[in-house]
Amino acid sequence: MNIVICGATSRIAHCVARDYAAPRNRFLLVGRDEAKLKTIAEDLKVRGASEVAFLVQDLSDSQSAGKIIEWARSRFDQIDIVLVAQGLLGDQMADQKDFNGLVKVLETNYLAPAVLLAHFANVLEAQKKGRIAVITSVAGDRGRMSNYHYGSAKGGLSVFLSGLRNRLNHSGVSVTDLKLGFVDTPMTAQFKKGILWVSPEYVAPRIIRSIEKGKDTAYIPGFWRCIMCVIRNIPGPIFNRLRL
Amino acid sequence: MKFPSWGLYPKILNEAAIELKGPQLPSLDTTFLPRGNGMSYGDVCLNDGGVLGLTKGLDSFLGFDAKLGTLECESGVTLDQILRLVVPYGWFLPVIPGTKYITVGGAIANDVHGKNHHLRGTLGNHVIEMNLVRSDGTHHTCSLAKESELFCATIGGLGLTGLITKAKIQLIPIHSALLESEQIVFHSIEEFLQLSQETDRDWEYSAAWLDSLNAQGERGIFLRAKHSETRISLEPHSDAGKFRVPFYFPNGTLNGFSVRAFNFLYFHKNIKRRSRSIVHYNPFINPLDNILHWNRIYGHNGFLQYQFVVPSSSPGKKALKDILAGLRRTNLGSFLTVIKVFGDKLSPGWMSFPMPGITLALDIPSPYGMDVLKILNQFDVWVEEVGGRVYPAKDARMSKEAFRRFFPNLEKFRAYLDPKFSSSFKRRMGF
């Protein structure tokens, strides 16, 4: 299989790639950190990938999408799986004053991935096969005062995916929205971990299963489906008095 | 998030941890200690008042030559991950200690040894090359041929010479993941030594479980194994069938009485004089790896581990017997007493623990009041008098004076310490 991973230096993406690293699987990795990409490429090759190439590119820049797609098409005749894994948590409190931070969060988590997916969509639509999977977040299910910058961007991306899924269904391409809950990664290093937290190693096989099944939306871990259902349905007047 | 050691003692009050994002050091305004899986028992993997640099993100493989059996990987890769990768290709780690769930960095820092020390020595004997980064910003690639002094200081160097970022290891070839194993009951130390002598020529792995509390004298079960030449199966170990200790047992669950009872049952279950079987490497080499969190059986107060080695000379054997008699007299109930004869292969590490002789490892459940600590200090004196030493990776209580006598290379080693690196053990030993 030919697998393209954007945001490949994400810990979760690395764990997913490892589980996919079997003979005859080839990888294209896109990320910002060259040294890390090199290390991950070596790791995947040792674990069995038959070919791994990487492109150093800042994925928060929506203008970079064209370049990425050109490069991918030059290396792979056919793209079987596209995984979009980049994200930026930002700092909600600080970004409420520093609007540059807010813009960065919105660009990295919504604008740039949406433009990138628009490019990939055309390629896979023409192929009439393939799978697209995007890591969003349960935070996108409802804006909460503690992280609505991040939440709204991820939520917006989920809506984008919903429309994309509708369009690409007519070409036999699946679009999977991976709504992850609390995962213990370098991005969440500063948070105190509790009972709801899981590891990237826990999440990776579940991501793969969701992609293989062509699921529309996967909550990982599954219990978030219930939790978010409750959160979504808390009546406004009550919700607004909370400090979630 | 707390980062205790495996023995859950000493307790740490104030420790910060940073996950290392890559093979670099963060900027340091307090002391730093690299931290793998924290499976060392005492305080070599603790840095109370300082910072721990977690290496769990440095877990990529960097190269594996399936013809030559060389493996290169980042220092946060665990021995468990290595085995899963290399066993299907007919390769094996030359040294595996009591657990596989340790990082390569931690394994080198403690210069671990296993049940095959008599043949293979320590892990340090099989490190081809490693990379270190130090707080002055320098990067070092060292081996026996290049920067060999830093190499020798780092093997067994307890993580104090710099951050090991990657290492290249020479693996050993195997035909099978299955072992032919044998277990033999013995009734005295002499019998044990006799068995070791016959065994260590032809068998890859050997060690013995000892019933240290039996009033009639030492008895135990000698275990030996070798990789099968005929049963060709290269299935690595799996996670299936693991048992997890779900909670901390009450302190004092393991005591003189309960341990005697366990030892009696265990010994008599295995009473058949000699028996052979074919086993997978996992339950033979790492039986405790299938019981997750087994340290919880010792309760919240944790336990002490004491491992020493004495030469096989007559004074050495006498010291060993005196220590065993001391254990019986004070009713210190060690649950998992293991005895083994070390071979002659010396490690390049200056601070390496094994030496030719007999090693005994025992655990001491809490409470460990002044009388327990006094008795262990007495054991240290007997060990030191015959030229033996105690293993720092397991220690939480040896005195600075004893440590200096056990490790004559300490001064040589000190020249290679990274000034910004420290550990609770280093400060306790005052070097």
Image: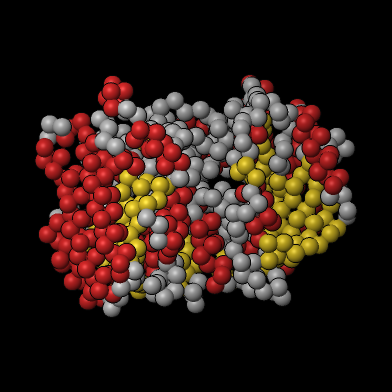
- Tally the marks: 0
The residue lying toward the viewer, choosing from B394 and B59, is B59
Locate the N terminus of chain B by quadrant.
top left
The residue lying toward the viewer, choosing from A26 and B259, is A26
Q: Identify the residue at horizontal 35%, vertical 63% (top origin).
A: A174
* Image position, residue B179 (x, y; %): 70, 65
Give the side of residue B193 with respect to residue A150, left or right: right
User: Does residue A36 appear in this view?
Assistant: no
| Image quadrant assignment for residue B327 | top right
Q: Identify the residue at horizontal 70%, vertical 41% (top origin).
A: B336
Locate the C terminus of chain B by quadrant.
top left
Is A219 above or below relative to B424? Answer: below
Colour pattern: secondary structure
Give the side of residue A161 with respect to residue B174, left or right: left
Is B200 above or below relative to A225? Answer: below
Q: Identify the residue at horizontal 55%, vertical 38% (top origin).
A: B6
| Image quadrant assignment for residue B279 | bottom right
The residue lying toward the viewer, choosing from B236 and B162, is B236
| Image quadrant assignment for residue B53 | top left
* Image position, residue A13 (x, y; %): 35, 56
The residue lying toward the viewer, choosing from B360 and A131, is A131
User: Does residue B246 appear in this view?
Assistant: yes
* Image position, residue A199 (x, y; %): 43, 46
Give the side of residue A33 with respect to residue B38, left or right: left
Is B207 above or below relative to A173? Answer: above
Q: Identify the residue at horizontal 41%, vertical 36% (top origin).
A: A227
